[in-house]
Image (spheres, grey):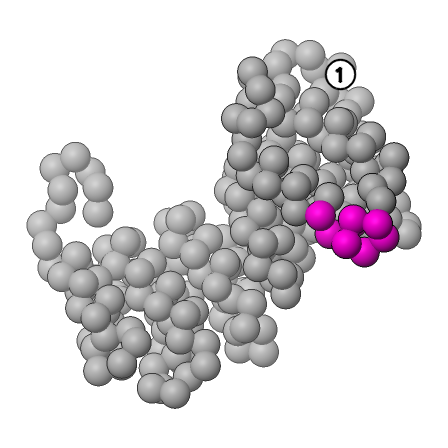
Amino acid sequence: MEISEDPEFCSMIDRLRDEIENDSGEVPAAFTELTELAALTALATLAGCEDRAGGEDRAEELHRVLTALGQPLWAREIAAYSLGVAGDPRAFEALVLLLNHRDPERCVTAAHALTRLGDPRTARAAAALATNELRVAYALVPVRLLAELRAPESVPALITVLGRRLRADDPHWRVGLACVEGLGALGDPRARAVLREALPHPRLGAEAGRSLHRLDSPPDPEGTP
């Protein structure tokens, strides 16, 4: 079992190492130590390791990193991600904060960990972030996460967000496009009205047409919407 089997973990570590080097010129020993601890946690999770005592010790250490005062953002992100993919609910709040970060790469990493975490609160949190018009510039990843989760909150939230993005000059049309794509993938007939409203939009119309076609197409016998 190799850590490369979790490419999101590798991508996060490479990104954070580059950030640290750009900011300070050198990577501190604490980064290497925390990365090794997180890698052991990720490997054990991927392998279904039954070393309960070792897993609990690693989780407690990661939780201390997550909650200690004065920790840099990179340390909190590594700890939150590692606890999340290991299914530890103590990572939930930190991951939700990262899901709405101004850095889209952090949002993507947080969404991946939240999906793996499987916390029942995730869909409600993603819906709250996606529908917060004051934070719409950072709503793209929460919108995509809602479509992936296929939760009861997903369709109403995506309909709400899309309804706000229908002005032709809306600067956040990419968020609207993600809503159109997500509603098409979810295949819920409640989306028909807002998708029809999106048809005249110069950036959303073509995809809205495809999503409407998916809603009107018969179900795939293999179960794919």
Up the image or down, 34 lies above or below 169; here it is above
- Give the residue at the far top of this rendering: 50
Up the image or down, 15 lies above or below 139; here it is above
Q: Residue at the location (56% across, 16% down)?
A: 1
Up the image or down, 44 lies above or below 177; here it is above
Residue placed most toward the observer, 28 or 102? 28
Identify which amino acid the numbered label 1 is placed on: Gly
Q: Residues within 10 Å of mark 1 (few under 14, many from 20)?
A: some
Secondary structure mostly seen in magenta is helix
- Picture quadrant where residue 78 is located: top right
- Give the residue at the far left of this rendering: 218
Horizontal side of 178 relative to 140 (left or right) equals left
Horizontal side of 196 relative to 178 (left or right) equals left
Residue 78 on the magenta segment: no
Residue 139 horizontal/vertical position (percent): 51, 66
Magenta segment: 18-25
Residue 53 horizontal/vertical position (percent): 76, 15
Residue annotated with mark 1:
54
User: Is residue 91 among what the camera can see?
Assistant: no
Horizontal side of 215 relative to 46 (left or right) equals left
